[in-house]
Image (tube, helix red, strand yellow):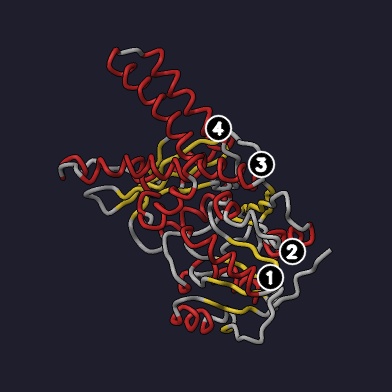
Amino acid sequence: MSRLVGPVEIIGVGLLGTSVALACRRAGIDVLLTDVDADHVRTASGLGAGRARSAADRPQLVVVAVPPDHLGGVIASALDGSDAVVTDVGSVKAAPLASLASRPDAGRYVGSHPMAGNERSGPLAASDALFDGRPWAITPHAGSDPAAVALVRELAELCGGVVVELTPAEHDRAVARISHVPHLMAALTAGRLAEAPDGHLALSGQGVRDVTRVAGGDPALYSQIVGGNADAVTELLTEVRDQLDTLIAAVTRGDRATLQSILATGNDGTRAIPAKHGGPARAMRSLFVAVPDEPGSLARLFADAGEIGVNIEDVRIDHDPGRPVGVVELVVDDALADDLLPALESRGWVSHR
């Protein structure tokens, strides 16, 4: 069984690449940094993520963290440039693998994809804790060397990820369903807002922010991601189109039964999403608390909930237009909600279900 001792080379020191580098350095592993932008290497080095690779360095593992359009070529160059195991952190797996199919050394390549990130980019946005507790897909192909698979698994676990092993095709269908198509749906919904009169937007609340949040991602990057997963995305978009035609017909005809059925299917989908820590979904309830927009108010609310003995499972904040308060949605265990509401009110909080 292979053991990751390093060095690890990171090709592409943006958010993901630098975060992998920082996690490796946290574990005491020598990290080599490579990027077409020398400023990125200098910045990442200054953050303690590693050092620029020299011609004499011999990496044990190469992690390719470049934009999707460049994955296949950079992976091939990494295989040519050393005898190291090569992985990548790209969001599409079948397309890069297809470009390597005829290579005799393709067994040293094992795809991977950490399900982590944020709206920022570049090495300054990186963190050694970015992957802690997050799913990290590993996608061996039929010719992958078992020792290479073990090494990539060790990298994921060293970085704090929770390994999920899938075939490349299964991975691409999965991310189309849980990431790529939802992103496109959010973009379509947000696009309707761009053309809306100001008076319409004045009614905006937390719901529309929740639905459209991911639409704020980099259009150039996401067009590469979606384009690289065209088959899986097209299959799901076709299903959505058919359902949208049914929905339009139901709304037009006033067909409440069909409309209710579509909405109920949406309820089923939200309940199918795993709960925190990957456990089964639990019954939750939302309570809404008015919180002054002042330093320390949120901390006081959370402290009061803790003293009452109720764990806050999730929280969202909607700022109240025209008033110096916000409405905080506390998501708590359904069985505890009835006790929390009067207990908060007894401490001076204005709340409702």
User: Element type at marker 1?
Assistant: strand
Residue 347 image position (x, y, % from top left)? 45, 48
The answer to whether mark 4 and mark 1 are in CB contact below 8 A is no
Q: From mark 2 to mark 1, how far is it between C-alphas? A: 8 Å
Q: Which residue is tagged 4?
A: 271
Q: Amino acid at mark 2?
A: Leu
User: Element type at marker 3?
Assistant: loop
Q: Which residue is tagged 1?
A: 61
Q: Residue at x 54, y 77 (%)?
A: 34
Q: Quadrant of the N terminus?
A: bottom right
Residue 57 image position (x, y, % from top left)? 66, 83
Q: From mark 3 to mark 1, how far is it between C-alphas? A: 33 Å
User: Callout 3: 10 Å neighbours few (<14), some, many (20+)?
Assistant: few
Q: Amino acid at mark 3?
A: Gly
Q: Is residue 194 left or right of residue 88?
A: left
The answer to whether mark 2 and mark 1 are in CB contact below 8 A is yes
Mark 4 or mark 2, which is nearer the start of the sequence?
Answer: 2
**Residue 164 visible within the image:** yes
Q: Amino acid at mark 4?
A: Arg
Q: Amino acid at mark 1?
A: Leu
Residue 334 image position (x, y, % from top left)? 56, 34
